[in-house]
């Protein structure tokens, strides 16, 4: 029987060697309890429903269902949904925008040090968000969008002009344009339409 202090973790990754290696490393952490290892998005959802873990370590790229689709399905669990940490080899678009989703709580590169993953698990379990060093370093171009920038991007996704966004968010048109400029710079895209397309690709509403 697990003690209340244990952090219950489900790990989902379709690369068995990586999954096994991560299992061996995490089993050496006395405060972490691995309750399921799965190799697909669909099995990740089943494991979460059965085991009710605190943390879901989730590979972004899986053949049946990517991490964003899994996260969308888990929304129906409401407050009982686990906090999600994405694991990926990618530090590029369209992955960085995923870090802006409110239901994604951590983002760690697979080539990061193991200590960084442990730090991410503890911080996310404690209610914080965690951006891996390879994601958050390197200037604004690699930083996730802020909450306000996401608001502006959602307005653009609804077809709002800068003036309409200004009215809706109760900020000046100049501020809207500044946020749009930051969005384009961070996502490295030529226009707001492309940014909206990326947002939809990641299942962000």
Image (cartoon, rainbow, N blue to C red):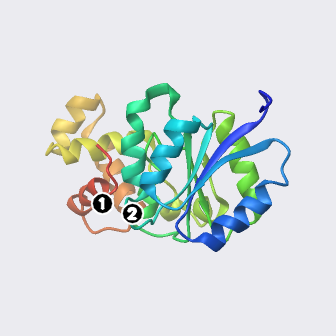
- The answer to whether the residue labelled 1 contacts the one labelled 2, judged by CB atoms less than 8 Å apart, is yes
Where residue 188 sits in the image (x, y, percent)?
38, 68
Expressed as whole percent of the image width and height from the top left, the position of residue 68 reads 39, 53
Q: Which residue is mark 1?
A: 198
Number of residues whose C-alpha sits closer than 10 Å to that of mark 2, classed few (under 14), some (14–19) or many (20 or more) = many
| Depth order, front residue of 179/94 | 94
Which residue appears at 44% of the width and 55% of the height? 41
Looking at the image, residue 173 lies above or below residue 143? above
Q: Which numbered dot is residue 160? A: none
The number of numbered discs placed on residues in the rendered structure image is: 2
Q: Is residue 111 left or right of residue 64?
A: right
Which residue appears at 38% of the width and 32% of the height?
A: 76
Q: Residue at x 80, y 29 (%)?
A: 3
Residue 101 in percent (x, y) is at 43, 45
Q: Is residue 147 above or below residue 144?
A: above
Q: Residues within 10 Å of mark 1 (few under 14, many from 20)?
A: some
Q: Is residue 104 visible?
A: no
Cα distance between the residues tagged 1 and 2? 9 Å
| Local secondary structure at mark 2 | helix
* Viewer-closest of 39 and 186: 39
Front tag of 1 and 2: 1
User: Considering depth in this image, is 107 or 10 the residue closer to the camera?
Assistant: 10
Task: Determine whether the residue tagged by mark 1 lies in a helix, strand or loop.
Answer: helix
Of label 1 and label 2, which has the lower sequence position?
2
Image x and y of residue 156, in percent: 21, 47
Image quarter of the N terminus: top right
Residue tagged by mark 2? 187
Please identify the quadrant where the C terminus is shown. Answer: top left
Q: Residue at the location (16% across, 36% down)?
A: 164
């Amino acid at each position: 029987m697990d003690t209340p202090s244990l952090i219950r973790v489900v790990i989902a990754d379709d690369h068995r060697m990586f999954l096994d290696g991560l299992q061996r490393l995490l089993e050496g952490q006395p405060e972490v309890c691995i309750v399921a290892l799965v190799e697909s998005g669909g099995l990740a959802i089943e494991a979460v429903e059965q085991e009710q873990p605190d943390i879901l370590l989730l590979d972004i790229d899986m053949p049946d269902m990517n991490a964003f689709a899994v996260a969308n399905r888990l929304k129906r669990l409401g407050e009982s949904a686990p906090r999600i940490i994405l694991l990926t080899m990618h530090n590029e678009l369209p992955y960085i925008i995923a870090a802006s989703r409110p239901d994604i709580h951590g983002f760690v590169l697979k080539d990061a040090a193991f200590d960084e993953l442990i730090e991410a698990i503890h911080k996310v379990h404690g209610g914080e968000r965690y951006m891996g060093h390879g994601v958050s370093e390197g200037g604004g171009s690699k930083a996730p969008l802020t909450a306000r920038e996401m608001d502006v991007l959602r307005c653009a996704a609804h077809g709002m002009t800068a003036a309409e966004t200004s009215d809706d968010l109760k900020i000046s048109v100049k501020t809207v344009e500044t946020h749009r400029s930051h969005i384009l710079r961070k996502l490295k895209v030529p226009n707001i339409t492309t940014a909206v397309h990326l947002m939809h690709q990641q299942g962000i509403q």
